[in-house]
Amino acid sequence: MDKIRLIASDMDATLLDEQSQLPAGFEETIHALAELGIRFAPASGRPLYTLEAMFPTLQDELVFIGDNGGAIRWKGQNLFTSEMSPEGWRALNRLTREQGDIAVLCGLESAYVERPFAVHDAVLRHFYTKIEYVDRLEDVAAPADKFTIYLPQHNAQQAYDTVYASQRSIYSVAVAGECWVDIMNPGVHKGAALQTLGQLWGLPSESIMAFGDTYNDAEMLRTAKYGFLMENGSEPLRQKVPFLAPSHREAGVMQVLHRVLAQNGCVCPEDFVPAH
């Protein structure tokens, strides 16, 4: 049996339901996990400030992994940040502009978007609760840990495979949904964030559980011994991760968490559905 000590979960199409709401009983479940010495980490492409706003009553209980692992915060303290070089993200901005795509510079305390793209504010603000619209993105002086490309035509996978493929030898690049391509410093991803926490807190892989649905979760699901792809997740990932969780429409993360609680945090692979 393995004793679970850390559980990380993606948000959209994983922990959240179809209305982007937390599942019923989530706060009580987090408290119950804490009593067993198990920490819970929302792990998202969202920035830290957006994640924290989603959990106003759980600030001291949760470990926040933001910007696909570009920043980690615990009890108000930044445990890790990975700032991109201004020269680097400015070059990415030029490429994005040439393609006619929409650039989002992800600062540690705000997102920055060029003013003409404010027409997409409703979509952007769903993920970035703090946005500053600017005349020229290249003039921003704030530190940033992620460069995101918004593709309203829902062609993120195609863009990843073609236009932005050249960046994969320079940066950590991930498809983060049908409309998003995320670019971080090399080696930055959710899996690396779990490794960082494991090193800080002395947690081996067998004490870590993780949930996700798409490609920017892949490293995280392979880093944790108990990595769960959601049933609604990207089909090709089933061959690359250990376990399968019920769909987010059925509160699949909560179903697994309740199993962990019922067994006092002690689990083994035979307890769960294999992904392949």
Image (tube, rainbow, N blue to C red):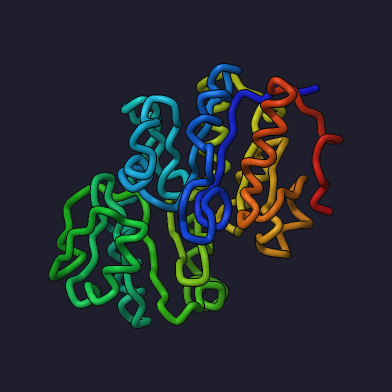
Q: Is residue 95 left or right of residue 259?
A: left
Say which of 14 and 139 sits in front.
Answer: 14
Q: Position of residue 45 (x, y in %)?
A: 44, 52
Q: Is residue 81 left or right of residue 5?
A: left
Depicted 195 relative to depicted 17: above or below: above
Q: Is residue 255 left or right of residue 39?
A: right
| Residue name at image x 37 percent, y 81 percent | 99
Residue 255 visible in rendering: yes
Depicted 33 relative to depicted 240: above or below: above
Q: Position of residue 29 (x, y in %)?
A: 55, 31
Q: Position of residue 271 (x, y in %)?
A: 82, 35
Depicted 124 relative to depicted 207: above or below: below
Q: Quadrant of residue 258?
A: top right
| Residue name at image x 41 percent, y 44 percent | 66
Say which of 125 and 216 sits in front.
Answer: 125
Q: Quadrant of the N terminus?
A: top right
